[in-house]
Amino acid sequence: MNQTPPVIVIAIDALEYEKVLEFNCKNLMQDFYGKTDISEFSDARTMVLWSSFMTGENKEEEILIDGDKEMWSKKWDLSDTFFSKFKSPVVLDLPGYSYDLKVHEKSRKLLKNYFQTDDEARKIAIVAEYNNDALEHHNEVKSKFYIDLYGDHDFILAYFSVIDVIGHLRFGQNVLMRLLYANVDEMCANIKKNQPESRIIVLSDHGMKAVGRFGDHSSYGFWSTNWKDLGSPRITEIAGLIDGRN
Ligand SMILES: [Zn+2]
């Protein structure tokens, strides 16, 4: 086991600041919380934002050169990221690093199919498969995350996409979103119970706003920690703030 408790990053795609407050998710809020500043980016793109987070540099231009489809296969080396400052980091399913490309490609394909069909029965079938895949994948990453908490790691990051994926089709439906937020809130409580000495940061790339029943990315992200007020950090500044014990 570790001598020092690991630094833990719970990376939640599209976790929305306003919803964390509305649903009163105390465990996600931790002791300090706020919004990140992503105003330097032309759009709230998942791959651009996580890439910029892990490298500590604005990678928008570099990612966009690859094009909308190709950008998803982008993979940064460990040495490009602040993870390399740790001895034994583990990073689960993060876009641009350790992402399960097949799972996420299937989600994007189903989403596209949903908007391309006018057939209501077909739409319902697509949503069922889409939500089911997202939840199944969520549970898989969560199980790995819980196991890695007991491994010999000084840094653990786990990325969860379910709130973004399901939010795109159902963000306007509070009942479902409340359940998903409760799920990640409870996960956060479990992590804290298991690793009370750890520094824990919850981070989203961007939030989400309702467009009818659907959801679109909002133009700021969410952060929280159990040790320090980060103010309104740019996403490229977070690496420096969570690296080291000060
Ligand atoms: Zn995202």
Image (cartoon, helix red, strand yellow):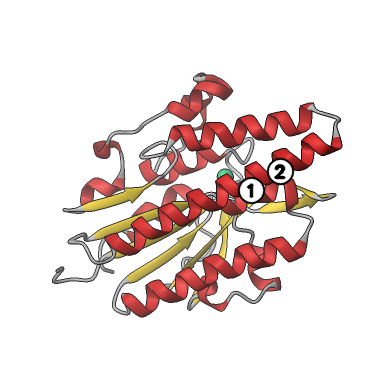
Q: Position of residue 223 (x, y in %)?
A: 51, 62
Task: Determine crowd level at label 2: few under 14, some 14-19, many 20+ residues with C-alpha closer than 10 A.
Answer: some
The C terminus lies in which quarter of the figure? Answer: bottom left
Left or right, residue 103 beside residue 145: right
| Element class at badge 2 | helix
Q: Nearer the viewer, residue 60 or 4?
A: 4
* Residue 7 falls in image quadrant: bottom left
Task: Determine crowd level at label 1: few under 14, some 14-19, many 20+ residues with C-alpha closer than 10 A.
Answer: some
Find residue 81 and name its label: none
State ligand 1's quadrant: top right
* Residue 55 falls in image quadrant: top left
Question: In the rendered image, which residue does mark 2 sit on?
Answer: 127
Q: Position of residue 61 (x, y in %)?
A: 51, 26
Q: Amino acid at mark 1?
A: Asn
Labels in figure, total: 2
Q: Nearer the viewer, residue 171 or 34?
A: 171
Q: Are marks 1 and 2 in contact (CB under 8 Å)?
A: yes
Question: In the rendered image, which residue does mark 1 sit on?
Answer: 131
Examine the rendered structure and indicate whether residue 14 appears above or below residue 182. Answer: above
| Element class at badge 1 | helix
Q: Position of residue 168 (x, y in %)?
A: 70, 45
Q: What residue appears at the point 46 percent right and 70 percent down from the top-left corner?
A: 188
- Specify whether residue 218 is in view: no
Q: Amino acid at mark 2?
A: Val
Left or right, residue 59 beside residue 171: left
- Specify whether residue 138 is in view: yes
